[in-house]
Image (spheres, rainbow, N blue to C red):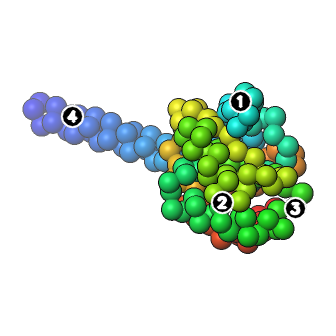
Amino acid sequence: MALTMKKILVFAFAIVLFAACTKQERKEAQPERVINELPHLKFTTLDGTATSMRNLETPLVLILFFADCDHCQREAQEIRKNLDLFKGKNIQFISAEEVSVIQKFAVDYGLANQPNVAFGRAESVDVYMNFGSIPTPSIYIYSADKRLIKNFKGETPVAEIAGAF
């Protein structure tokens, strides 16, 4: 009788283990959910106007940055040198820093008065809620129909960004 009880326990344990492994495999096989449209990120333009990314004109290059980030600074320099690659496209820089810091960045990198370049400030929690944990710069390319075409994490060659359209 004891031998039969051991067999039952071993069999029951094997079934539980198998079920747990199968369930885990199914969970891992599911693709990550990707939001493929302009997010509802609320931000403030440098003139103090509250808006949302949903209100931006597309096609759009969205750049999430920090002014003291070396990679962000180099990205801004390269974009300024190659603005002709972005004709007919809007470029929106957004940071969680103070407006004065963002304005200085825009001026320092020659992007402040460009017709297709704008800057804004968003709360870091809102950026996180819309994009998750991201490096800076993080660059998102949206088509004319407001769909995500491609995103880049970190410093990216400008020709690669412009070529994503």
Q: Could you give the CA–CA distance between mark 2 and mark 1, rounded to whole angstroms?
A: 21 Å
| Residue matched to label 1 | 48
Contact? badges 1 and 3 (CB < 8 Å): no
Q: Where's residue 69, x and y in %?
A: 50, 56
Q: Which residue is identified by label 3? A: 87
The secondary element bearing badge 3 is classed as loop
Q: Earlier in the sequence, mark 1 or mark 3?
A: 1
Tell me the amino acid under the disc marked 1. Gly
For the residue labelled by badge 4, is the local secondary structure a helix, a strand or a loop?
helix
- When asked about the image quadrant of residue 74, the answer is bottom right
**On screen, residue 71 above or below 122:** below
Comparing marks 4 and 1, which lies closer to the viewer?
Answer: 1
- Image depth: mark 3 or mark 4 in front: 3
Q: Residue sitting at 56 percent across and 37 percent down? A: 98
Q: State which mark lies toward you, 1 or 3.
A: 1
* Residue located farthest toward the left when viewing the structure as drawn: 2
Q: Earlier in the sequence, mark 4 or mark 1?
A: 4
Badge 2 vs badge 1, beta-carbon distance below 8 Å: no
Q: Residues within 10 Å of mark 2 (few under 14, many from 20)?
A: some
Q: CA distance from mark 3 to mark 4?
A: 71 Å
Between residues 142 and 115, which one lies in front from this camera angle?
Answer: 115
User: On the image, which quarter does residue 23 sit in?
Assistant: top left
Q: Tell me the kind of residue under disc 3.
A: Lys
Q: Position of residue 103 (x, y in %)?
A: 65, 45
State which tag comes first along the sequence, 4 or 2.
Answer: 4
What residue sits right under mark 4 in the picture? 9
What whole-number distance in Å separates the C-alpha atoms at marks 1 and 3? 26 Å
Left or right, residue 28 beside residue 73: left
| Residue at the spot 67% in from the left edge and 52% down from the top edge | 106
